[in-house]
Amino acid sequence: MRVCSVVILLCGFWWGTFRICAQNTRFDPDKDLLLAQFDCKTDVDDLHTVAALATVLNHPDYRNVNYYAVAGTYGIQKGRYVPANELFQLAFNNRWSSAHEDENLTAQKILSIVERTLKKGGDIWVAEAGQSDFSAQWIRTLLALQPQLSPKKRIHIIQHSDWNEEVTSPENLQFVKETTDYRKIPDGNARGNGSPGFRSEEKIDWEHRITDPKLRKIWETALRIGNQYNGKEGRYLNTAIAGGGLDFSDLVETCYILGLDDLKDANAFFVFFAQ
């Protein structure tokens, strides 16, 4: 029995090590920057995605990820913004800024972080949970300062949504597609298409998986603010959230970047990140 237990433990350790190594095939945690950009206009799904991202970054395997988050990176869509500074502060502390409140100042902040990462030899991975207009803004400035940079090799923009592309200004969408390593992955609102399906019409029993007090508060805040603004004052009505489900479909880009795109759906997410 003791020998069998040792073998099982060794196999488990080997598999866990293999899985972690296999996951990090794109992002280099020692050098790269994860830049999570959220439009927050007008769908409240971004709020659930913020909570899900905080859950990922709190996991022991991903606590050393160099990241920064930006709220309000919207494009040309109409509709009202979803204010969620309370949630962003709770989830990311001092590692976020609001482009909605001051786009130019936030772009300068991102530019500074990006330049620091590039100088150290790291790449930039943008999880585009929204449109690409803000990305185009800071990338144009970056290339003006560093014309020798090869953005096709150093800046990777990950997008999953046709709608996000449709409400990005055409000239900015064309710019990022032609200038950077722009990758379109399958939509996270559906299941079985190659990306995790993180939009769930049915209620997900996340409370029994997420026991960490801070993470629980983040999720509770995301749900509260999401319910407060969902479909209100002309904002998009997310029927999955209105029916008591969850929608963190924009997290699929981060999952792609970190090599977690084998997660099937929301239930699988909470099983994997239970803490």
Image: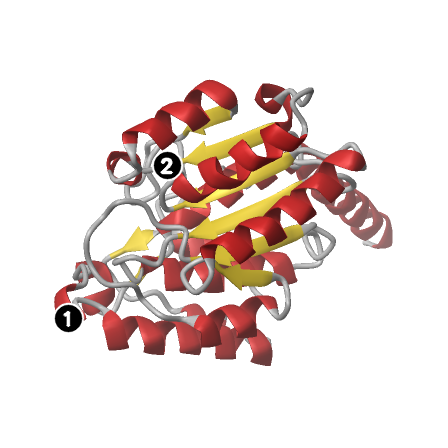
The residue under the point 67% across, 33% down is 123
Residue type at mark 1?
Glu
Pick whichever, 114 or 201, lies toward us.
114
Is 142 placed left or right of 157 in the picture?
right
Nearer the N terminus, badge 2 or badge 1?
A: 2
Is 160 placed left or right of 117 in the picture?
left
**Rendered-image quadrant of the C terminus:** bottom right
Q: Quadrant of residue 194?
A: top left
Q: Badge 1 is on which residue?
A: 233
Q: Residues within 10 Å of mark 1 (few under 14, many from 20)?
A: few
The residue under the point 69% across, 50% down is 65
The residue under the point 44% across, 44% down is 134
Is 43 placed left or right of 112 in the picture?
left
- Residue 203, position in %: x, y? 28, 66
Residue type at mark 2?
His
- Residue 162, position in %: x, y? 27, 34
Q: Is residue 107 above or below residue 148?
A: below
Can residue 270 be seen here? no
The residue under the point 74% across, 53% down is 64
Q: Quadrant of residue 247?
A: bottom left
Q: Badge 2 is on which residue?
A: 160
Q: Secondary structure at mark 1?
A: helix
Can residue 152 be seen here? yes
Q: Nearer the viewer, mark 2 or mark 1?
A: 1
- Residue 178, position in %: x, y? 45, 19
How far apart are the alpha carbons under marks 2 and 1?
Answer: 27 Å
Pick whichever, 122 or 202, lies toward us.
122
Q: Secondary structure at mark 2?
A: loop
Q: Is residue 242 above or below residue 126?
A: below
Colouring convention used in this rendered image of the protein? secondary structure
Checking the image for residue 215, the label placed there is none
